[in-house]
Image (tube, rainbow, N blue to C red):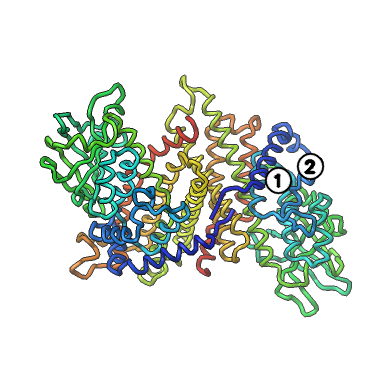
């Protein structure tokens, strides 16, 4: 039992924090917020040079073989800078799904390119009618003589606009009809009959809705050999939630630091706001919740590879708890900044919006407490 | 980073399990489960202390030269976790965890030689004389006075919320020996024999129906000057040192988890008409479980820092606050889970020696008293409001 950072982990944290402090300042964030792409290809290249895109990729595919704890260290620093590059979509979700589901040739074709920065991915899974139920997929992949024909509608695809290839989930239908299995397909973003409706995402970055109307794909577009991909999807989303939880911790820490400074400087009734006990106690509660969130993000990261039920409970517990803490810390940061907190003139609002996006992504606190409870009964 | 135990730690874990299996009697287990107050009755608690002492585990936090077992923080974690899981009785923490460390840190060689072995063996039972009717959160305003008379102090005044004063043969107390420029000055830390003439104890019943705390009166009580720990007038420093131990002994999550498990078991049983089938109850159990997970991780992070000799700092206030709040959440949930059976009042104590059939199932007897008595968790050892002040000052610098 040891929760201290190793020397390598400490170095990773230092380099990530240094990068964010030096290259990812308020000016850069403002530029990105108004940029049609929403992120910087130059920064993506830097990520590749720093080895961050190779971080979780296995060494045999040109990666560094890092784990969820390393990803969490990076994500917490990204949160502090409100980084908007498509890291989760490509490196956390995309690389994980290909690594777990792909055939050797598919891994060889994609993973080295993810690691060197030449391939960006997105994961198109959520559908409107499914809400947060990962098992509910209405998109269909029909087996044809030449390969597959996909039809369906996906929503809230993280950074889909930036992706070279999109991993699309669909129910597999063969010659006998529905197989009861979900498959994952690697779809080129430029495929005909694929309509991407891009929108700027709350709190930075982009997302899109995707309409697939008879997208024809070759046989080998299917990742793996047709086994049900649902366990892999749940596994990958649990990993993503752990990573996003760490990012939320970084965001919350920045909000706490900023708000603390503000209450020391801002004077009303002839004294700093922080001289009032009601303010001091609010800040103490915020600090406590940031600390609890940090514990839960780390816990989820340390449990991404344990048995499925325990992993899923750790991930849902973390998502629910961090979401709750995030709403509190975010809302109180605005409250303690007073009227200025509600304006776009300060950055508090941008950080808050990213937290709201975090809370809703893959399901909010209520959904994940319910999932946690449901899984507890099956444990 | 690693959340799992290594081979040595696992070996120690089986050693602890083996010890508990051999020494924890069914009677002790039942008595502990049916104790709705914070502390076990001394006959139960001290029997466990004697067993621990025989094993050399009487005081896990003490240095080896005074009889501590020289455990690593991870071993202490394992010991506390296994103890909570098995439902062992509470020992006299006022001795082992409170006055013991102060005597070790600031006591004379004579005091160490006399008192420490008696704490380990369970021969002495200690109570804490801190709060007074006029001095709660503002503890250093205390007025109980010790006036020097030759080789003695003569003590007059009163202490309140004194846990188990009616069982204890010794008290450690903060008393005023002079009036300094600040109210923290002039306080001394003194050890009192409870059989000294002039000491009277008045029981105070808590709202759960338990006699655990008392008010203690001192009327010209003569205590040798040799019973003062450390320097005269420095008692506040020693007292604060002790409070950090009280707040940050740091391993509370395992007990909370067992408490929640008991409630979840009730919720899943026919005794409550399967309360857990209500989505609201099921979700609230998960919410509390997740809060315990978070507290446990924070405890483990602190423990890891301690392993490498880092100081955890003001996080002891966070641990105290969250532990007390979660404990209250568990007991609140308990009341809601047992439903109509929360109406039944069982005034007899101890609950493990009732001479009649209780009105509700035995497993439910402690639920309401624990909820009621448990309101004290956010009050004793420094209220939640005081803890938030400490966090603001020590962690946030405001």
Query: Residue drawn at (73%, 76%), measured in percent from left and top?
Result: A179
Query: Residue drawn at (29%, 65%), measured in percent from left and top?
Result: B28
Subunit ID for the residue under disc 2: A
In this view, the residue farthest toward the top is A270
Disc assigned to residue A201? 1
Above or below A88: residue B397: above
- Give A179 or B45, whichever is nearer the viewer: B45
When asked about the image quadrant of residue B256, the answer is bottom left
- Give A38 or A77, whichever is nearer the viewer: A77
Query: Where does residue A102 sit, x and y in percent of width and height?
Result: 77, 65
- Give A64 or B162, whichever is nearer the viewer: A64
Q: Answer few, some or many: residues within 10 Å of disc 2's Cα (few below 14, many 20 plus, some between 14 and 19).
A: some
A115 left or right, relative to A70: right
Above or below B274: residue A286: above
Query: Where does residue B107 sit, x and y in percent of width and height?
Result: 30, 39
Residue carrying label 2: A46
Query: Where does residue A59 sit, x and y in percent of width and height?
Result: 76, 57
Q: Answer few, some or many: residues within 10 Å of disc 1's Cα (few below 14, many 20 plus, some between 14 and 19).
A: some
How many callouts does the rendering have?
2
């Amino acid at each position: 039992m040891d929760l201290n950072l190793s020397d390598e982990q400490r170095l990773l944290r230092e380099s990530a924090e240094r990068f964010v402090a030096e290259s990812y300042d308020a000016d850069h964030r403002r530029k990105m917020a108004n940029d049609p792409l929403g992120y910087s290809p130059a920064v993506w290249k830097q990520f590749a040079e720093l080895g961050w895109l190779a971080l979780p990729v296995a060494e045999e595919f040109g990666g560094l073989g890092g784990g969820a704890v390393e990803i969490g260290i990076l994500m917490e620093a990204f949160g502090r800078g409100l980084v908007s590059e498509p890291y989760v979509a490509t490196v956390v979700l995309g690389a994980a799904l290909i690594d777990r589901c792909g055939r050797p040739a598919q891994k060889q074709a994609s993973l080295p390119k993810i690691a060197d920065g030449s391939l960006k991915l997105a994961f198109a899974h959520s559908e409107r009618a499914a809400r947060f139920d990962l098992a509910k997929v209405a998109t269909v992949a029909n087996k044809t003589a030449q390969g597959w024909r996909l039809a369906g509608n996906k929503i809230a695809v993280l950074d889909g606009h930036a992706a070279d290839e999109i991993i699309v989930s669909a129910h597999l239908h063969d010659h006998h009809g529905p197989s009861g299995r979900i498959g994952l397909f690697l779809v080129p973003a430029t495929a005909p009959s694929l309509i991407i409706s891009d929108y700027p995402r709350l709190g930075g970055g982009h997302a899109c809705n995707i309409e697939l109307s008879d997208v024809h794909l070759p046989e080998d577009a299917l990742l793996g050999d047709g086994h049900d991909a649902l366990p892999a999807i749940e596994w990958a989303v649990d990993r993503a939630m752990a990573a996003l939880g760490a990012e939320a911790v970084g965001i919350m820490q920045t909000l706490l630091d900023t708000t603390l400074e503000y209450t020391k400087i801002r004077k009303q009734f002839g004294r700093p706001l922080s001289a009032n006990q009601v303010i001091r106690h609010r800040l103490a509660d915020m600090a406590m919740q940031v600390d609890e969130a940090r514990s839960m993000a780390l816990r989820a990261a340390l449990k991404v590879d344990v048995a499925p039920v325990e992993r899923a409970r750790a991930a849902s517990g973390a998502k629910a708890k961090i979401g709750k803490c995030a709403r509190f810390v975010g809302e109180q940061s605005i409250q303690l900044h007073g009227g200025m907190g509600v304006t776009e003139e300060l950055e508090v609002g941008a950080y808050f919006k990213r937290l709201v996006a975090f809370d809703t992504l893959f399901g909010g606190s209520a959904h994940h407490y319910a999932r946690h409870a449901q899984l507890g009964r099956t444990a | 980073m690693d959340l799992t135990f290594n081979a040595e730690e696992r070996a120690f874990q089986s050693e602890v399990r083996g010890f508990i299996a051999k020494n924890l009697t069914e009677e002790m287990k039942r008595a502990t489960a049916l104790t709705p107050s914070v502390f076990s009755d001394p006959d139960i608690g001290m029997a466990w202390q004697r067993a621990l002492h025989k094993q050399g585990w009487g005081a896990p936090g003490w240095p080896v030269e005074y009889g501590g077992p020289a455990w690593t923080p991870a071993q202490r974690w394992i010991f506390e976790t296994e103890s909570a899981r098995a439902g062992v009785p509470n020992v006299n923490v006022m001795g082992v965890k409170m006055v013991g460390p102060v005597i070790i840190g600031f006591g004379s060689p004579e005091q160490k030689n006399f008192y420490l072995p008696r704490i380990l063996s369970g021969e002495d039972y200690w109570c804490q004389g801190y709060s007074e009717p006029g001095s709660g959160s503002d503890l250093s305003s205390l007025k109980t006075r010790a006036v020097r008379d030759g080789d003695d102090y003569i003590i007059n005044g009163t202490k309140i919320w004194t846990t188990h004063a009616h069982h204890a043969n010794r008290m450690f107390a903060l008393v005023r020996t002079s009036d300094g420029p600040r109210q923290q000055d002039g306080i001394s830390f003194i050890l009192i024999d409870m059989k000294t003439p002039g000491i009277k104890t008045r029981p105070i019943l808590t709202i759960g129906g338990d006699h655990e705390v008392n008010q203690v009166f001192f009327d010209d009580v003569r205590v040798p000057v040799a019973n003062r720990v450390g320097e005269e007038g420095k008692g506040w420093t020693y007292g604060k040192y002790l409070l950090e131990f009280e707040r940050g002994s740091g391993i509370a999550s395992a007990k909370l988890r067992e408490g929640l498990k008991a409630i979840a078991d009730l919720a899943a049983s026919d005794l409550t008409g399967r309360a857990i089938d209500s989505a609201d109850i099921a979700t609230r159990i998960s919410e509390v479980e997740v809060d315990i997970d978070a507290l446990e991780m924070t405890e483990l992070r602190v423990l890891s820092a301690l392993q490498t000799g880092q100081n955890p700092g003001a996080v002891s206030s966070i641990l105290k606050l969250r532990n007390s709040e979660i404990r209250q959440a568990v007991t609140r949930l308990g009341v809601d889970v047992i439903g109509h059976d929360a109406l039944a009042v069982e005034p007899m104590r101890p609950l493990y020696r009732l001479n009649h059939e209780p009105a509700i199932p035995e497993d439910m007897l402690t639920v309401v008293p624990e909820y009621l008595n448990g309101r004290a968790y956010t009050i004793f050892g420094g209220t939640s409001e005081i803890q938030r002040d400490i966090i603001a000052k020590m962690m946030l610098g405001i």
